[in-house]
Structure formats: structure tokens, C-alpha cells
Image (cartoon, helix red, strand yellow):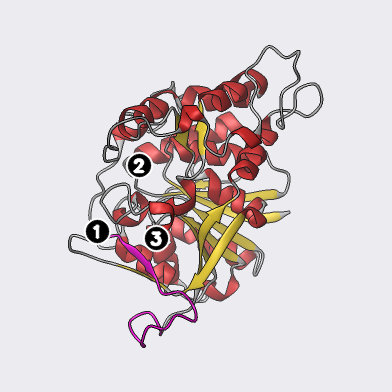
Amino acid sequence: MRKVIFDTDPGVDDAMALCLLTRRPELELLGVTTVHGNADIDTVTRNALHLKQRFGFKAPVAKGSGVTLLNRQGQGASHVHGRNGLGDISVADTDPTDLDDRRGHRMMIDLVRAHPHEVTIIAVGPLTNLARALDKDPEIARLVQGVVVMGGAFGIHGHTGNVSPVAEANIANDPEAAEAVFTATWPVTIIGLDVTQQVVMDSAYLDCLRQAGGEDGQFLWDVTRSYHAFHQRTRRIDGVFAHDSLAVAYVLEPGLFTLRRGPVRVVCGGIASGQTIQKPEHSAFPLGAWDAHASQSVAVDVDVAGVLALYAGTFIPSGPVSPLGLHPAATVPVWTPGAQTLSDASRPLAGPPVSR
């Protein structure tokens, strides 16, 4: 089993990723830390406690940073994730005393030190908690097994940004934190829009999860209703990008991803704030601002069918109903990975995309 810390701002796609993570026996969830992002810190922390109740995991939840590294307030994304951050599904009352007493970055430090060289941090929100942990205890960079980040956009496959022409939301929400994390000496793998926006869970796929995936499948369908409508309205696709789930999928099956190595810098301030730029290893550029920093890994391609099969196979049992093609007798929508590189239902409709 791989020990993981999940740093998150739930968030519809965060909830989808956490559902995947908690249902995989290969992963041992040590702790969940919350961070400002998709909603304010109190809302996302309540959501994390709600998901702990719903998914039944035992790992502690710690409230993390509610402001950026430079003490700015975030904007939130209620137009994407709903007023309550979870697609406006019903969220049960939670008990604040269920929270761990430590701040998010402190619990992160403690867990890494308790399990040296064994912990992978999966970070799917702004990177403020990770930057604060590095600041308080730089030695943890040597003690983690790795850091996997959902964030950034490098222009591969034409994906350059979703909150500006050049910036992805998690990085744009705290570019200074991202710069600190990406230029640290720990090994980072960045799963950005370059691959997450290649993978579309379309209507047939989501219906398949709902009808064959039990209670989890029903939850995944429920939580994506307004998220799906957002994608139809703004991205012109009949489906959703499950961004954060791809960070978990990478930890489970790294062979599904193609990586490019090289140091990564983040633009902090100005009209390009939040832009992520990698200088690929062995490139012919002269020495510059990248070269004093360690190389990191950026995902530049993905096995779309493989990721979709991995996700569906977690919730749909094998046998009479298989994630690799439902039994003809089953009264549920038929989905097969080979048909989903981009199904007709998921291809962009006419008209330009609308900003996230």
C-alpha cells in the first residue's frame, strides 16, 4: 500500500477524486488537509468532513490555510461547483470537533516525519499548505516519497488555461505558493490541463456509473449534475472533466501517463499571473531563470481509455456487469473504453468555448 496525504479544496472534482482514492486498496489515506480555493476555507473544510462521513474513511481531517501565501483572499468558484462547493447536493451537518487540532500544514509535516520516505502528497487545490509546510520544515522535501499536483497548463494539446488565457485555477489562486513548491528539491509530478482536459466523462459514462456503481455511483452522478451543466454551457461538451481524479489515477497507474522532465517556474503577478512554464531537459536554450532549480515531471499525454477504465472499474463490479463493456442483458447504458477517446457526445459543439 502507498501512504498518501490528500490536500484538497472540495470541490466537485475533489469529491470524485477522494471517492476514487478511498475505494482503492492500494492506497492508505493518512490524512486530509483542506485549503482555500473552490470555496472559502470553512466551506471546503465542512465539505471534507461531510465526505469523510459519506465515504467512511478514518483518516483525520485538518483545516488548512484560508488565505494565500501572501495573505490574499481567494475568489472561490461557486459558478463551477455550486453555492455549497459540492454541486448543491444535500450536505449533512458536520461536527467541527471532528477536526484534527493541528493546522493543515502542521499535520502534513507530522505525517511525513512519522513515515519518512513513504508518503505521497496528492495536492488538488492551491498549493498554500505545501508551501507553508516547506517554510516551517524544509527538511520534509527530503523525506517525502513524492508530490503529485493537479494544476497548471503547459500548452500541450492546445490546453493553456481555464481562468485566464495562460493560467489554470489552482495555480492562479496562489502562484507564489506554486512557485515555492515547484522549485523545491522534492520530486513533483504535475498533472495539468494538458491531460485532464483530454479525458471526458460523458453522459453515457456517468449514467453507467449511476446505474451499475452502487451507492458510490449514484453519489458520483448526483454530485456532477450542476458541474455537467456548467461544462455543457461553457465548454460545449456533454460531459465533465474529472480533473483531480487524474492525480489519483497517476499514483495508481503511472504508466497511463507520458511525462516530460525539466524545471518549472510560475509567473507571479501581471497579466500572465499563474502561468506555468517548463524548460525541458536537454533543450538548447541558454542558461536562465530555470537552471538553478531541480527538474520536475509534467504530464504531456495520457491513455484516455485506460484512465476511464481504471475509474469505472473501481466502482462497477466485474462479472455480469463489467467496466470493460456492460453485459448485453444489463439494463444500463453500454460504455466501452475504446469508444471513449472522445465520444461524439463529448466532442465540442459549435461555437467558441466560454471562460471558466
- Mark 1 burial class by Cα count in 10 Å: few <14, some 14-19, many 20+: few
Which residue carries the number 3 mark? Answer: 154
> Residue 128 is drawn in which quadrant?
bottom left
Residue 185: give x, y in percent of width and height.
Answer: 50, 76
> Residue 313 is drawn in which quadrant?
top right
- Mark 3 burial class by Cα count in 10 Å: few <14, some 14-19, many 20+: many
Tag shown at residue 38: 2
Residue at far left of view:
270
Mark 3 or mark 2, which has the lower sequence index? 2
Which residue carries the number 1 mark? Answer: 71
Mark 1 or mark 2, which has the lower sequence index? 2
Which residue is painted at 47% across and 31% down in the image? 346
Type of residue at label 1?
Answer: Asn
In this view, the residue in front, 20 or 288, is: 288
Quadrant occupied by the C terminus: top left
- Give, as a single range, the part of the protein colored magenta: 273-291
Which residue is painted at 75% across and 16% down in the image? 328
